Amino acid sequence: MAIWTPDLTGRTGPKYRKLADAIARAVAKGELRPGACLPPHRILAYEIGMSPNTTSRAYAECVKTGLLCAETGRGTFVRINPQGQGRDTPADLYRPVAGPIDFSSNLPFSGSSGRYLAQTLGELGRSRDLQAFMDYQKTPGLAHHVAAGTDWLTGMGVPATAGRTIVTCGAQHGIMAALMAATRPGDLLLTEALTYAPVMAMASRLDLKIRSIAMDENGIDPDALASACRSHPVKAVYLTPTIQTPTTATLSNDRRKAVAGMSKTYDFILIEDDVYGPLRPGEMTPIAALAPGHTVYISSMSKCLAPGLRVGFMHAPEALVPQIFQSIQLSCWMPPPLMVEIVSQWLADGTAETLKTVQYREAVRRQAMAGEILSGQGFRADPCGFHMWLPLPSPWDTHSFCRAAADQGIKLAPGSLFTTDGRSDPGAVRISLSHEPERERVRQGLTALAALLQLPGPKDGLVI
């Protein structure tokens, strides 16, 4: 197969500049289309009689100007949106538009928040009072930032007050701060049998004992939770009650009431990770509204507005607030005030609601597409969630299926990632629909998985 070679005829200037200009011209004329992979710089150097250093410098120049993107181990690609014009979902180093289709990362959609950010930064630039965003804060959050977060949490159904609202650098930071505040080395932490993978790493770092609680298709089993609480002193319980990671289950209000009652009976702190709650507003009662004195409620702007927006709001029992403040100061001193100011403005002017709607609508579209392509495969999904949970048909096991998918250029998250021991095989994979910026690549990947599921499965370590 012939590789692309540039036309350098009539070009003047340094050799690297000639090549960079030729690449830009080829992109403009459509000879190099968005997502196209350029030849390795050493091979191109041989083809056109330049040194590898020269071709490498030309590629680097095009990356710097936004024409190309490069990823170690994968290659150099034409951006979907060269030079920032036209489309709203440019490729970047983390979301390539060529190569393996990534269903393993459960990030929200890249969306179109950039244009709103440009407007907000312009408005901030005309403000006369920017110094406050460049200084240290005594508490994690300026007063009006805390007020904005309190209003957001109230809208989620949490009986929030400013004195118990805390600003964080996203939900993961909030979880870590809550664990640091509520537990001590050797304490017992309970989680769902399949749970958010970083929680296991946090528990290990904090020297916590961790025990998983049985689940069914509707989420954590309240009877199993009660049995564990009767058997051992429990300090904290971590749950994702809405669109659970990875199983997509949402706890019913009856189960939420049961869990809330147990937090009071057995006196444990419940860490309620509700990052997906905004995708189903008003449908379920937060456990924090049922047991406010025992629940740390965690929300995140990153999941429902824009993934790079590392801001979250948490609400905690009054007695735990000072310890959480200390945990935040120990870990990062304070969330960046400028980023929290952007969130506060977006919450006030309606931009947050617009971006949340964009996430919701795209989730609905992709879930509908996935449901059609994988019809009859027994998957679990929420109509407005970012991911799916796919139990594998016999004789597939998780390792073999993920390896077979990888051979076809598809990255999956094996179910073992979500077990507390990291080794057990639940016989399922998580499929994240939101990481890929292009809907067509999602369609291609799902179609390939559907075809793979029709095969008889592994035999002697091979896919037949």
Image (cartoon, grey):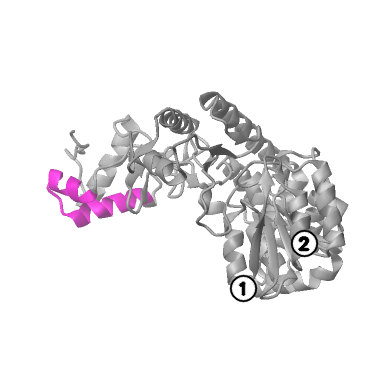
The residue tagged with tag 1: helix, strand or loop?
loop
Residue bearing mark 1:
207
**Badge 2 is on which residue?**
229
Q: Nearer the viewer, residue 358 or 321?
A: 321
Q: Is residue 219 left or right of residue 90?
A: right
Examine the image and state in which quarter residue 174 appears: bottom right
Foreground residue among 54 and 304: 304
Q: Are marks 1 and 2 in contact (CB under 8 Å)?
A: no
* In the displayed structure image, the side of residue 58 where residue 383 appears, left or right: right
Point 47% across, 37% down: residue:
85
Mark 1 or mark 2: whose residue is earlier in sequence: 1
SS under mark 2: helix
Residue 69 location (% of width, % of height): 38, 47
Magenta span: chief secondary structure: helix
Q: Residue 410, can we see it?
A: no
Q: Is residue 333 visible?
A: yes
Label 1 neighbourhood size at 10 Å, few (<14), some (14-19), many (20+)? Answer: some
Foreground: 272 or 365? 272
Residue at x 59% of width, y 31% of height: 367
Question: What residue type is disc 2 on?
Answer: Cys
Q: In which quadrant of the rendered image does the N terminus lie?
A: top left
Q: Nearer the viewer, residue 141 or 437?
A: 437
Q: Quadrant of residue 72?
A: bottom left
Position in image of residue 377 (x %, y %): 53, 29
In the image, the segment drawn in magenta is 41-63
